[in-house]
Image (cartoon, rainbow, N blue to C red):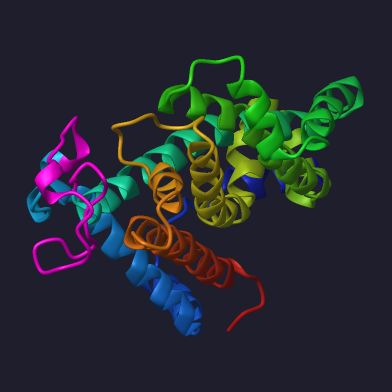
Amino acid sequence: MKNRMENNVLNKKPISIKWENVRRNWYKFSRNKLSIVGLLVVLIILFLVIFAPLITSHPEAVTKYVNFSEAKKPPSLSYPFGTDIYGRDTLTRTIYGFRISLLMSVVVLLISVPIGVILGLVAGYFGKWVENLIMRITDIFLSVPTLILALALLTILPRNLVTTMIAVSLVWWTWYCRLVYGLVTSIKSEFYIQANELIGEGKSSILFKEILPNCLSVIITKMTLDVGAIILLGSSLSFVGLGAQPPTADLGGMIADGVVYLPDMWWMAVFPSIALVTIVLGFNLLGDGIYDMFSLGEA
């Protein structure tokens, strides 16, 4: 029996991309029309973020720039989103605000996902005291609301974009640790995992070559959905003055500056708010489509 299992494991064919699988996944993704809308929104925002210096007509608006002769102007052809109290173009600052939002979400995920995934793999596979130690620490972090914990960390750290990203990363890894831990505890009892253990395959190889690939679809789906949540959290911190500091164009900071002048200068708060809702909604719809694409049992 051992020889049979060894042959099954060693003779596995390398994974290759099949176009029929790509077409099937695209079909499952595109069945939900809102997912297509989300994809288009995300692609448009990415285009604006990448080519912001080329498509914005007032790039100086994101620097230490003051032009009181153009201040407080309502939306017009020259300034589609109006100007703020310093004469800076709100449209330009909104587009650059997308940059800050996406930068924060990417950095937070790059830091928190590897930490959470590795800890979840170790806790779920090895169990015993390792599981108890890692999961009890995770539970402590999860018991405190994310925003409250991030606010507490930022009160003792310098107030800038870098420390905001670090603070959010320190609390975000717990979700991936808990998610992967739950997946691993069920996967490690599968027959092919036991087969690899019987033939003497190393534990690190089993973790990263056998178990982790089976968790990737769920992890990718959560990462896509988390982009919107991280952007909202970062904007909330900026709204209370703990995120990106002036003159950096940040959607949360722009909304905080604009609400002071409502309703007279409504455009200062309304357009950044619409932009924030749009980017969060776009990634949420995209995440729903990716979830449908990876769901098992779909046609």
Quarter that holds the C terminus: bottom right
Q: Which residue is drawn at 83% across and 30% down?
A: 135
Q: Position of residue 178 (x, y in %)?
A: 76, 41
Q: Residue at x 64, y 22 (%)?
A: 153
Main structural element of the magenta stretch: helix, strand or loop?
A: loop
Left or right: where 252 falls relative to 207: left
Q: What stretch is highlighted in magenta?
A: 61-88
Is 171 placed above or below 71 here?
Answer: above
Q: Does the magenta stretch include residue 68?
A: yes
Q: Position of residue 277 (x, y in %)?
A: 46, 63
Q: Which residue is drawn at 19% across and 58% down?
A: 73
Q: Where is residue 43 in the image (x, y as percent from the top left)?
A: 30, 63
Is residue 202 visible to us here? no
Asked whether 192 or 292 is in front, the reply is 292
Left or right: where 164 falls relative to 141: left
Q: Does the magenta stretch include residue 216?
A: no
Is residue 194 visible to us here? yes
Total number of numbered discs in the rendering? 0
Left or right: where 78 falls relative to 209: left
Quarter residue 113 falls in: top right
Q: Where is residue 267 in the image (x, y as percent from the top left)?
A: 33, 62
